[in-house]
Image (tube, rainbow, N blue to C red):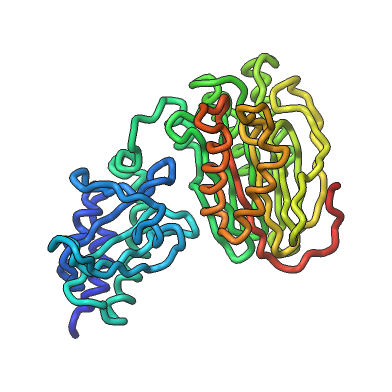
Amino acid sequence: MHADPLLELEHAIWRAQPHELISTTTDRVKAALGVTDAEVLLADYRMTALVPVRPDVEPVRIDNTPAGHSFAAQQVVDERPGNGSAADQAYLVHLPLTVHGDRLGVLTVQIPADPPSPEIRADLERVAGVLASAIKVADQHVDVFRRARRRSRLTLAAEMQWELLPGRSCTTDEFHLAGQLEPAYSVWGDNFDWSVAPDRLTLTVTNGMGSGTEAAALTHLAVSALRNARRSGADITEQASLADQTVYAQHRGAKHVATLLLDFELATGRARIVDAGSPQLYRMRGTATELVELEAQLPLGMFGDADYVAQDFQVEPGDRFVIVSDGVHGAKSPAGDLYGTLALKQTMRDTRLQDPSEAVRTFIRSYLDYHEGGEPLDDAVVVCLDWTGKTSNGAASPR
């Protein structure tokens, strides 16, 4: 029986030592599939560039480049030879590296003859899928991928916040969500978290008060308490109560954490929400864009004995939700106008045809442009959720 070269390649990827994963993959891809070169590029923390894992290769912009288009559109993109130097004559194929909707980067291969055969193209897509999963696993054991993704040094607070994230996006049959932190390399108190169970999605957006490592540590404490309660089987009101008690026990009310907690039933679209602070929830349903008015409750840790109550509302297929921290909705233009007054809803309308992962990138650009060259005064988080789930059961929506 003849060995399957592609299967052997997949086995080699999974057997590779984490620090040798990229070199093993590129070498094996060239040997097994006859490509002349291969490169792995990862999205940087700011989501503006694709950064090669090999340090001697230049980063590639995400906007207006073939590799960036592959990443942004999540499609295989062919780059045909140009008319410049010999290096420009290569036929390149860019393949997105994605795991359950979490966009990691792009695998770029150089093909000796153009275009690649359908069989080679299918094999490359299969390899890209295996490699993305292997990178996700290897990333827990080495620093090489985190080092590649940073185009400048992260502050300690930002390091803490990025390590706390479950990822930057997630896709299932029922939803697609994505989030982004800004300033990416020096964020301090803002964060988001999610967990998917067979029957539900739990999503939280958190903003620890203060700045620097103190805010990051405060958020870390609150998110850890929320996760501890969630993993013990607690619902979102119990999660909020435990986190409230935990933060209060540590700081005795001197510090608190603004948090929005949401819980969605995947089968019905029935959702429950606890508004414990400043993050705001906006909904786009059809052509209507509105701030979802919620019952404001105490931030976590203010008194330590708050009795949190969840509001019920119904999510419908096609709904888009955008959640922003006060650093976004409270941002001011040089003229003093709040971003959350008009510009935020306009950005929602402008990004309606983009998927959530691209929408949050556009939101961050819009948010920064709103300052007209000035520096934002607060850090920011933007989370976008598209609901594609099953028909609702008719529960009421908060107004």
Can residue 227 be seen by looking at this rendering? Answer: yes
Say whether residue 278 is left or right of residue 1: right
Q: Position of residue 299 (x, y in %)?
A: 72, 27
Asked if residue 363 lies left or right of residue 79, the reply is right
The percent coordinates of residue 296 (x first, y second) are: 80, 33
Task: For the N terminus, give its image quadrant.
Answer: bottom left
Relative side of 86 to 52, left or right? left
What residue do we see at 70% from left, 16% from top? 253
Residue 133 shows in this picture: no
Q: Quadrant of residue 284?
A: bottom right
Percent from the top left, x then y, of residue 367?
57, 38
Residue beneath the point at 34% across and 59% down: 67
Q: Relative to 138, does residue 130 appear above or below in the rendering?
A: below
Name the residue rendered at 54%, 38% in the picture: 369
Give the vertical position of 337 relative to 262 (above or below). Answer: above
Farthest bottom residue?
1
| Residue in the picture at 81% in, 40% down | 294
The vertical placement of 297 against 251, above or below, is below
Looking at this view, is 97 or 334 the one in front? 334
Number of callouts in the render? 0
- Place residue 382 in its image quadrant: top right
Q: Residue furthest left?
A: 86
Residue 317 x %, y %: 71, 64
**Left or right: where 384 falls relative to 85:** right
In the image shown, does 280 or 362 lie closer to the viewer?
362
